[in-house]
Image: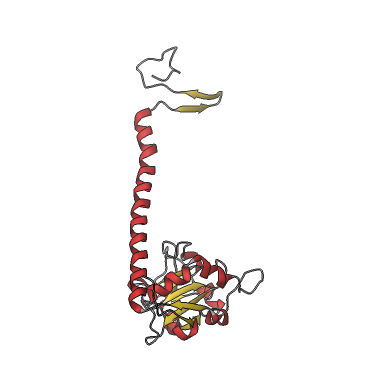
């Protein structure tokens, strides 16, 4: 998978780089309204995926004014304020969403010779991420500006190798997620199995302190506090 045709190229030669709309939009977001989802840093996870369970919306009438901030499949959205270094690849499910002021959108130029999937993996790679964060503007909330993104150098192999490495990493992620799901099922089974085994043989807190309640019987026993 090693290429003889690596090139170094600035990010702004590969992508259109666009920060999100002004911060005033943030105050217009709310949950549970009928509108357009707005992707903000809280929905961008540490493993560079989207958790949309609590995503907020902006009213459709307001979204019309923000059309230039619409997302398309293949766009990358990077956190530029707050949890720096997090990057997600936009898929079909997020088409026409908007992105917030604390994010930066990268849209690959058609003639650039880079795959969005490869660029996503490259931007999320810890050494690359750390190099970008190291250039953040210091302050109460660290911030990355458009110029900092623009100057980032991208190591670019040929398209075939980009496709191969992105595909290999996707396969690893799929396998890892299947193991995580299996682990969650086993975690859920553990208390359920013990609860079934113990039945009602559980401590009961009373005014006089903890007391062990034995299995239900028709009449109390002097040894009712023993587990049986």
Q: 67 above or below 203?
A: below
From the viewer's perspective, tell me whether residue 101 is left or right of residue 72.
right
Of 40 and 123, the residue lying toward us:
123
Which residue of the protein is positioned furthest toward the front in this rendering?
Answer: 4
Q: Quadrant of the N terminus?
A: bottom left
Query: Residue shown at 45%/79% (left/top)?
Result: 106
In x, y percent, where is residue 45? 47, 63
Of 190 and 98, the residue lying toward us:
190
Which residue of the protein is positioned furthest toward the bottom in this rendering?
Answer: 111
**Quadrant of res 214:** top left
- Count the marks: 0
**Quadrant of res 53:** bottom left
In x, y percent, where is residue 200? 39, 27
From the viewer's perspective, tell me whether residue 166 is left or right of residue 25.
left
Q: 223 above or below 58?
A: above
Q: Quadrant of the C terminus?
A: top left
In x, y percent, where is residue 92? 33, 73
Can residue 130 be seen here? The reply is yes
Of 189 and 211, the residue lying toward us:
189
Can residue 57 be seen here? The reply is no
In x, y percent, where is residue 15? 45, 83
Query: Residue shown at 33%/54% (left/top)?
Result: 178
Q: 3 above or below 206?
A: below
């Amino acid at each position: 998978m090693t290429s003889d045709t690596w090139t170094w190229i600035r990010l702004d030669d590969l992508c259109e780089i666009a920060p999100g709309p002004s911060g005033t939009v943030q105050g217009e977001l709310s949950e549970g309204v009928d509108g357009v989802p707005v992707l903000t840093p809280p929905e961008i996870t540490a493993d560079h995926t989207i958790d949309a369970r609590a995503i907020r919306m902006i009213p459709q009438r307001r979204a019309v004014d923000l059309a230039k901030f619409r997302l398309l499949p293949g766009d990358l959205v990077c956190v530029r304020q707050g949890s720096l270094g997090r990057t997600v690849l936009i898929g079909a499910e997020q088409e026409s969403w908007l992105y917030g002021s604390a994010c930066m959108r990268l849209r690959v130029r058609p003639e650039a010779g880079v795959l969005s999937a490869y660029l996503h993996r490259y931007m999320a790679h810890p050494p690359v991420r750390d190099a970008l964060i190291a250039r953040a503007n210091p302050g109460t909330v660290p911030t990355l500006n458009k110029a900092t993104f623009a100057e980032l150098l991208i190591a670019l192999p040929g398209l075939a190798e980009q496709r191969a490495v992105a595909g290999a990493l996707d396969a690893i992620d799929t396998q890892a997620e299947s193991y995580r799901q299996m682990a969650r099922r086993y975690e859920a089974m553990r208390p359920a199995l013990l609860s079934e085994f113990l039945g009602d043989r559980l401590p009961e807190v009373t005014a006089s302190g903890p007391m062990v309640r034995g299995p239900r019987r028709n009449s109390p026993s002097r040894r009712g506090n023993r587990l049986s």
